[in-house]
Image: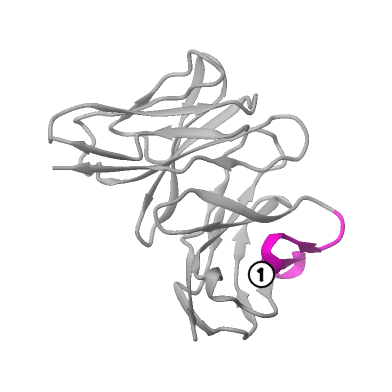
Amino acid sequence: DGGITQSPKYLFRKEGQNVTLSCEQNLNHDAMYWYRQDPGQGLRLIYYSQIVNDFQKGDIAEGYSVSREKKESFPLTVTSAQKNPTAFYLCASQGLSGNTEAFFGQGTRLTVV
Amino acid sequence: AQSVTQPDIHITVSEGASLELRCNYSYGATPYLFWYVQSPGQGLQLLLKYFSGDTLVQGIKGFEAEFKRSQSSFNLRKPSVHWSDAAEYFCAVGARQAGTALIFGKGTTLSVSS
């Protein structure tokens, strides 16, 4: 089945540690996105990529980094510079041809302990 | 500035009653419009979308939405709510340029009472 897979579903991190969230898609989509979700805040864009080896900052990129070495993969690293990393992270992908919506993964809940 | 406003943070509806969730947007041009639904701890599922044509669009699970250009609105409706509809609902807008990230409202939480 085609879709987006985020792993792990739950992640615990100690303060001061970097952690990487995985996002893989087999929909052959060119564009991929990372959103952060906090209660009552909706979804806020962290980073997005329209093509391999290229990505752009979203509204809240500070303390995060990404890479896009393969079309299928768009991992997000939450660095120790992110002041408040505890949140629900959602990855999405979208085709660039025709009228298409964004498809979402099931999310990763990151908790800093 | 581009934005999406969902005025109602939380709505409670009796099972079997009708539902309308409001969405207003501010955008430079006519955008693409979407409604997504999210169950707790899950990802977002697309309910329906508007790209062009008929301004009343039908979606999954018996939902529909109407695009009103003059009011910059895209309200979601359902004639008879089921207990399983309890979830969080997000309105989103996107540019007609492919690959532009969607902008989301802050969501409306729907509770269904028996």
**Left or right placement of residue A69 versus residue A31 in this view:** left
Query: Please, is residue A50 above or below residue A41 in the view?
Result: above
From the image, tell me which residue sits under label 1. B75
Q: Is residue B104 left or right of residue A94?
A: left
B69 is higher (above) or lower (below) than B78:
above
**What amino acid is found at the position of numbered circle 1 in the picture?**
Asn
Q: Residue at x 49, y 23 (%)?
A: A55
Q: Say if the magenta span includes residue B60.
A: yes
Instruction: Say what secondary structure mark 1 lies in.
Output: strand
Residue at the image position 60 percent from the left and 67 percent from the top: B23
Q: Is A33 inside the magenta-drawn segment?
A: no
- Structural crowding at the residue carrying mark 1, measured as other residues with C-alpha within 10 Å and reported as few (<14), some (14–19) or many (≥20): some
Q: Is residue B81 above or below residue B17?
A: above
Q: Chain of mark 1?
A: B
The residue located at (59%, 28%) in the rendering is A31
Q: Is residue A61 left or right of residue B90?
A: left
Farthest-out residue, front? A1
* Region in magenta: B53-74
- At 48% from the left and 48% from the top, the residue drawn is B43
Front residue of this view, candidates B30 and B57: B57
**Residue B10, how many percent across, how many down?**
44, 75
